[in-house]
Image (cartoon, rainbow, N blue to C red):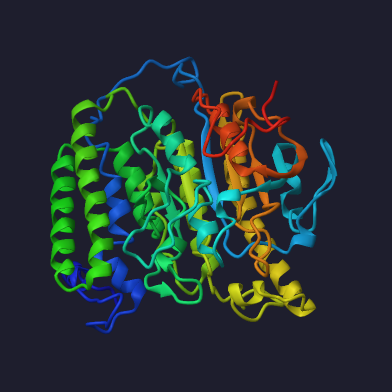
Amino acid sequence: MKRSAKQSSQRESSVYLNGDAKLRGPLSRRTLLRGTGMALALPWLEAMMSESRGDEASVETDAQGQRPSDTPIRMAAMFVPNGVRADQWTPKGEGKDFELSPTLQPLSSYKDKLLVLSNLWNQASNVGDGHYVKCSGYLTCTTINKSLGIDLNCNGRSVDQIAADFGEQHTPLRSLELGIDPVTTGVDTNVGYTRVYGSHIAWNGPTSPLAKELNPQSVFDRLLRATKPSAQSAWRDQLLLDRALGDVKQLNRMLGASDRHRMDEYMQSLRSIEKRIEKQSASQSANWQPLVSVNPEKRPGEASRDNHQEHVRLMMDMIALAFQTDTTRVCTFMFGNAVSGRNFSFLDGVSGGHHDISHHQGNEEKLAQYQLINQWHIEQYGYLLNKLESMQERDGTVLDHSMIMYGSGLRDGNSHSPHNLPIVVAGKAGGRLNSGQHLSFGNDTPLANLYASMLSALGTGIDKFADSTGVLPGVLAS
């Protein structure tokens, strides 16, 4: 039976908590975070930046009805938790003459559009124990503060946000931050880090993790609103933002010191959004139009919590749609939070949670299950590549004009090592990447060198990032 809008509103606006102490209602943490707006409403509100555009905007087009400006180059960074089975990841052979490994075999159709990169490492994350440093430092290449939640700080900005700085003037949405799992709160007492670090890879500043959208329906609505703005959009956006700020203030009175500090950071994010809405309304170019229309009748169904693959693939669809329409050119996606215990028993041959299985200790049965989980993740990545490849665009496809990075912040879930990270990049960046190769670099080549290369391929004029020592040889087309 469907709930009425009033019933739904009452449930979603109810205030519960405390994340650090005791729950004041019967809801799970997932529902709690949605209800307070900390995980879902925040990124949805970030979409309310483009409503100053009118439907009457006009642009010059070429004979094919496309804009005469350069074909857009997109960048996505995908994160998979818990590493990979190392002995099944690395291809045989190097350069153009290589053979895909068992884990990468599902990508065989795109071999000529892949860069498989070996011996990259993230030196800044080679501190502390466990997963959190490797997760929050995945796209920043910086060392996060060891924190229980009071002084959350990654000490940098993530590469996706550097890319978004360059592309934001071209698209209504600066970037998309997407994921599957809600923000995890509390402290992992085994390693002494707040679990919040394991919920974010995108950072707009040292103390500003960007909340990720978890609901594909909400993502679709953001894309639709961006491509079909209405006269009332800005007013509705400000009203919803005011309500969100009010909810946060109400909740803040119920929290302990640690949670109040965290919520203060979210308040700062919301205020930043408010300023961005005002700026966008005042100065956003009226000349932007989507490269293709978003059909409101193709809104995805509600993702089932019981069907993980359906949820993931709906999110892949949203990334593809965002890139195809040129609503944004930068996206991050987390297949799961760090230390994800997602149960993969829906796969034949797997029984148990991802994190536990990744701590295989050399056990052959666990290693076999670990490999099945790794290959499943690659298959979902391949699903996105297939979507992008099917989208024709000028002299190629959307995939040809993209860089879609897939990887993890650690090599093997059992050892937690940030050496020789499992990294693959698909797409040609409009011919700027020398794709179709397995490149093996010297031991402990900075991961930041890859990010410097990607920023260069985007045409940012930036060839230095974090601890990079230069662009990766052989990656950029000559």
Image location of residue 301, percent across then percent down: 41, 61
Image location of residue 401, percent across then percent down: 57, 31
- How many numbered badges does the structure rendering display? 0
Instruction: Answer left or right for 478 relative to 224.
Output: right
Could you say which is closer to the camera, residue 242 or residue 275?
275
Could you say which is closer to the camera, residue 414 or residue 287?
414
Image location of residue 133, percent across then percent down: 51, 59
Considering only vertical position in the picture, is 219 above or below 128? Answer: above
Instruction: Answer left or right for 274 relative to 121.
Output: left
Considering only vertical position in the picture, is 416 above or below 47? Answer: below
User: Can residue 436 be seen by looking at this rendering?
Assistant: yes
Could you say which is closer to the camera, residue 59 or residue 47?
47
Quarter-wise, where is residue 284 in the image? top left
Instruction: Answer left or right for 268 relative to 341.
Output: left
Considering only vertical position in the picture, is 117 above or below 254? Answer: above
Name the quadrant of the C terminus: top right
Quarter-wise, where is residue 394 in the image? top right
Image location of residue 241, percent across then percent down: 18, 51
Quarter-wise, where is residue 30 in the image? bottom left
Name the quadrant of the N terminus: bottom left
Identify the residue shown where x is 42% and y is 48%. Answer: 155
Identify the residue shown where x is 71% and y is 44%. Answer: 117
Identify the residue shown where x is 38% and y is 56%. Answer: 213
Could you say which is closer to the camera, residue 339 or residue 27?
339
User: Can residue 397 be seen by looking at this rendering?
Assistant: no
Identify the residue shown where x is 59% and y is 77%. Answer: 353
